[in-house]
Image (tube, rainbow, N blue to C red):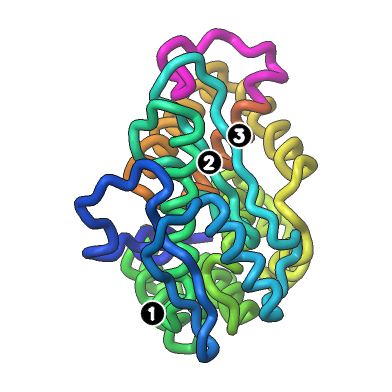
Amino acid sequence: MVYPEEPFWALPMVSGLYEDRDYRGNNFYSIEWQENKYYICYFIVNVVEALQEFWQMKQTRGVELKNGALVIYESIPSNSQPYVCFVTLPGGSCFGSFQNCPTKAEARRSSAKIALMNSVFNEHPSRRISDEFIEKAVQDARASFKGTPQNNELPESGIGAFRFMLEANKGRTMLEFQELMTVFQLLHWNGSLKAMRERQCSRQEVVAHYSNRSLDDEMRAQMALDWIAREQENPGVLRRELVLAERELETARMAGRELRFPKEKKDILMIAHNQLGGSNLGATSIEN
């Protein structure tokens, strides 16, 4: 399957979204619901609490959240600064601290800030999957297509599957769509989509099957087994892929981009690495 690069798969960075302010401490936004729209107001509030409140308000307003409104934080173990924290939103999107944070609490606030900015921006009508949105996304996908141009419109092509998946989720916002989108990105990266195509599975069957599956430990473990097999056939491939995944994740985190896909890649590769005995990666690991 072919996936377009930015601006579609990653939430865009909006010019003027970041001001030259000192965001340390608890200075940020409060959220209000008026006339069927969310408004953010600059007040002295706790940004971590504000992010949780935002998603609880969405759930109260009737937005279906498969895993509830809980915002999940994950701090990367470290004995020294800068500290790093990731936050996963209901719906599957993931963001990370985008500043050099001297404390774990500051890292959590940093991740909450970028997540709240994107959560609020996600309420804009342009982030909802509509016919116009689908046409623009498919156009972007064609522009980044690396295969034979005459084949990219075929129903069985990656572009065709991409369009089918978007049309099946019309009406949802991009953050609500994120987990399903990440599942198919991982299936493509892992080679699973190619294997299913070789078994004559139709894209409708694949989309229908994985639309009802969560990105859980079982799926990660299965993909990790694939990478263990690759490592046994071609020693060193796992280390190289892990170094690339960590580099991609670090670059995207510092740029304030959405991180679910690169983070899941790194987590899956680390599962495989640990099951193989966890040879020393030295300075290639971002935790070091």
Q: Amino acid at mark 3?
A: Asp
Q: Are marks 3 and 2 in contact (CB under 8 Å)?
A: no
Of the numbered discs 3 and 2, the one sitting upstream in the chain is 2
Q: Amino acid at mark 2?
A: Phe
Of the numbered discs 1 and 3, the one sitting upstream in the chain is 1
Of the numbered discs 2 and 1, the one sitting upstream in the chain is 2
Q: Position of residue 206 (x, y in %)?
A: 72, 64
Which of the image's four quarters has the C terminus? top left
Q: How many marks?
A: 3
- Label 1 CA crowd tier, 10 Å (few <14, some 14–19, many 20+): few
From the image, tell me which residue sits under label 3: 267
Q: Which residues are magenta?
A: 272-288
Is the residue 82 above or below the residue 208 in the image?
A: above
> What is the residue that sits farthest to the left in this orientation?
20
Q: Position of residue 185 (x, y in %)?
A: 56, 54
Q: Amino acid at mark 1?
A: Lys
Q: Is residue 100 left or right of residue 138?
A: left
- Label 2 CA crowd tier, 10 Å (few <14, some 14–19, many 20+): many
Give the Cα separation between the discs numbered 2 and 1: 30 Å
Q: Position of residue 148 (x, y in %)?
A: 38, 64
From the image, tell me which residue sits under label 2: 86
| Point 60% across, 46% down: residue | 191
Give the Cα separation between the discs numbered 1 and 3: 32 Å
Instruction: Name the disc covering residue 136, or none.
Output: 1
Give the Cα separation between the discs numbered 3 and 2: 13 Å
